Image (cartoon, grey):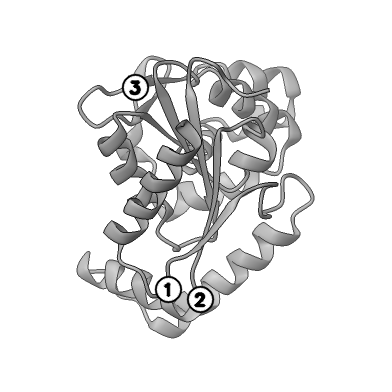
Amino acid sequence: MKSNSTYIITIDGTSGSGKTTISRSLAKKLSFSLLDSGKLYRSAGFVYLQSKEMFSDLNSINALISKITMLSNSDSNEFEIFFDNKKIDHLLYSEEVSESASIVSKIPEVRESMMKIQKRCVKGRGLIANGRDMGTEVFPEANLKLFINASLDIRAKRRYKELKNKGEDVTLENIYKSLQKRDESDTNRTISPLRVPDNAEIIDTSDLKPDAIVDKILNLYTITKN
């Protein structure tokens, strides 16, 4: 059953394929809210780092996760993340938080809580949901489902350039191996594995500029809207 009031676009795909850049551009052009599920899971990783000892007890896990809230920023269109009423977006991008997010995302109770938070983001005229299982698990009723991919070689080069520009000491070989490992993990995990959603439009970004991809998606949106 598709939402009558809120138009939902899901964007799933491989790591480094350009999902986030595309999602942000689309959100601005359509004035839709943007949900980044990766950021949400990082927030769970952040909470885990604050209270590791409490993650052995299910009631404690639920109590901690219930303190995570999301509010849409009207300027950026993005949902910002708060823990205990304090904004934590800027604290979510360390390697330690990233590793912790991978740990807690395997806990079924955490995923269940994350699902509820994500479902509450469906409001307003439209929502763009960016992640790994948006079209398969979270919003299977979405109006438009997309699966974004690019060759591993291209994705590694993009990530290498991005990190080098930030001044990080990285090698292309290590990034390639890291993305390869991430692909295997995402595809083979037991809970919500990465897969192409039913009725999804598959877009390969290897040889396409972000603007061309966004234009293509806007055309698909116009077709499905009418």
Residue 7 visible somewhere in the drawing: yes
Residue count near mark 2 (Cα–Cα under 10 Å), binned few <14, some 14–19, many ≥20: some
Q: CA distance from mark 2 to mark 1?
A: 6 Å
The residue that label 1 is drawn on is 206
Q: Residue at x 30, y 38 (%)?
A: 90
Q: Secondary structure at mark 3?
A: strand
The residue that label 3 is drawn on is 72
The residue that label 2 is drawn on is 151
Residue 93 visible somewhere in the drawing: no
Q: Position of residue 178 (x, y in %)?
A: 53, 71
Q: Secondary structure at mark 1?
A: loop
Furthest toward the right, the residue is: 190
Q: Kindly indicate the quadrant of the structure image that contains residue 144.
A: top right
Q: Kindly indicate the quadrant of the structure image that contains residue 114.
A: top right
Give, as a three-letter code, the residue at label 3: Ser
Q: Residue at x 37, y 78 (%)?
A: 157
Q: CA distance from mark 1 to mark 3?
A: 31 Å
Q: Which sits in the foreground, 202 or 69?
A: 202
Q: Quadrant of the N terminus?
A: top right
Residue 120 higher or lower than 51, as above or below: above
Residue count near mark 3 (Cα–Cα under 10 Å), binned few <14, some 14–19, many ≥20: some
Of tags 2 and 3, which is closer to the observer? 2
Q: Position of residue 83 (x, y in %)?
A: 43, 22
Q: CA distance from mark 2 to mark 3?
A: 33 Å
> Do tag 2 and tag 1 residues touch (Cβ < 8 Å)?
yes
Is 104 left or right of 10, judged from the image as shown?
A: right
Give, as a three-letter code, the residue at label 1: Ser
The mark nearer the N terminus, 2 or 1, is: 2
Residue 226 higher or lower than 210, as above or below: above
Q: Secondary structure at mark 2?
A: loop
Q: Position of residue 214 (x, y in %)?
A: 34, 52
The mark nearer the N terminus, 2 or 3, is: 3
